[in-house]
Amino acid sequence: MPGSKNGSRTKRVKPVEQDPEVLELGRKVAMLALERTRQNGSLNVRQRDQLRRALVRAAEARGWVLLPDGTTDRVTKATQDLAILAEAGALSLKSDVADEVAAKNNELKQLQEVARSIQKMATSARTSYPAEIEYSHTARQGSQNLVTKTQTLTLSDSAEAQSAAATLEKSMEGWARLRDQMLEELAHRQHQIEQTRQSLSGFLDASRPLVGEVLSVLV
């Protein structure tokens, strides 16, 4: 590529969405911006170090070191590119949550279908054992966290299938309550991500000094 570090050499880069590694980097930056929102506009020491490492990776992946000289201009251009990364990352996080909400909304219906399927297996003379059934439900992990837990049942005979179907039916109500709680958490997460997107300018302004430090080291 023609030019020198002191010239106008630039690096051609793919759109963030077309580069999985860079998109994952954008997601990391967006998650740090989200943490800053949750923490009333500040990052702790560990998170600042994570941001610094992310900026180094971004500088290498996006060719910041090849930006034209002029400290203020280089920092501005690099920060503008950081905004593109953060926005793409935030949209990716938002899409993940939307997918999770859709899956949660369909969870009880799928569990009911699994229970009916096991009942049919138990009463069918054509069922071959052992038989495996996989299903997912909302569960509590630790004292606070809610997660989606996937379980696999290995059924050895019709009596075991009948028992499994009955147990599944009895568990539905409790899982439904946990699912509703998780939907509330997901809605809150969606709101936080959107809030972060709307306030990215504050995150970027706060990141400028760190962008400048990274560029000065990479020159």
Image: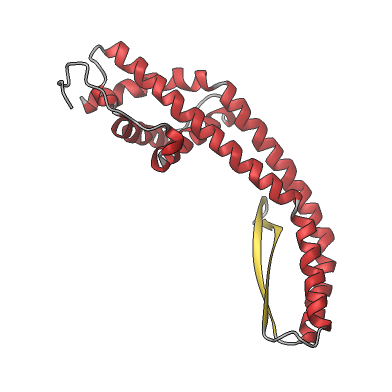
Q: Measuring 27% from the left and 13% from the top, which residue is drawn there?
A: 71
Q: Residue at x 25, y 25 (%)?
A: 65
Q: In this orientation, which residue lies closer to the viewer: 88 or 31? A: 88
In the displayed structure image, the side of residue 59 where residue 163 appears, left or right:
right
User: Of residues 201 and 116, which is closer to you in this image?
Assistant: 116
* Quadrant location, the N terminus: top left
Residue 208 in the figure: left or right of residue 103: left
In this rendering, position of residue 165 left or right of residue 50: right
Q: Position of residue 46 (x, y in %)?
A: 42, 37
Residue beneath the point at 23% across and 14% down: 69
Which quarter of the image is occupied by the C terminus?
Answer: top left
Residue at the location (70% across, 86% down)?
A: 128
Asked where in the image residue 82 lies, by quadrant, the reply is top left
Q: How many marks?
A: 0
- Percent position (x, y) of residue 108? 79, 57
Above or below, 105 relative to 124: above
For residue 51, what is the image quadrant? top left
Image position, residue 30 (x, y; %): 50, 33
Give the percent coordinates (x, y) of residue 70: 25, 11
Q: Is residue 74 above or below residue 42?
A: above
In this figure, which colouring scheme has been used for the structure? secondary structure
Pick the residue in front: 96 or 177: 96
Residue 64 appears left or right of 208 = left
- Residue 161 vs 190, above or below: the answer is below
Quarter-wise, where is residue 137 in the image? bottom right
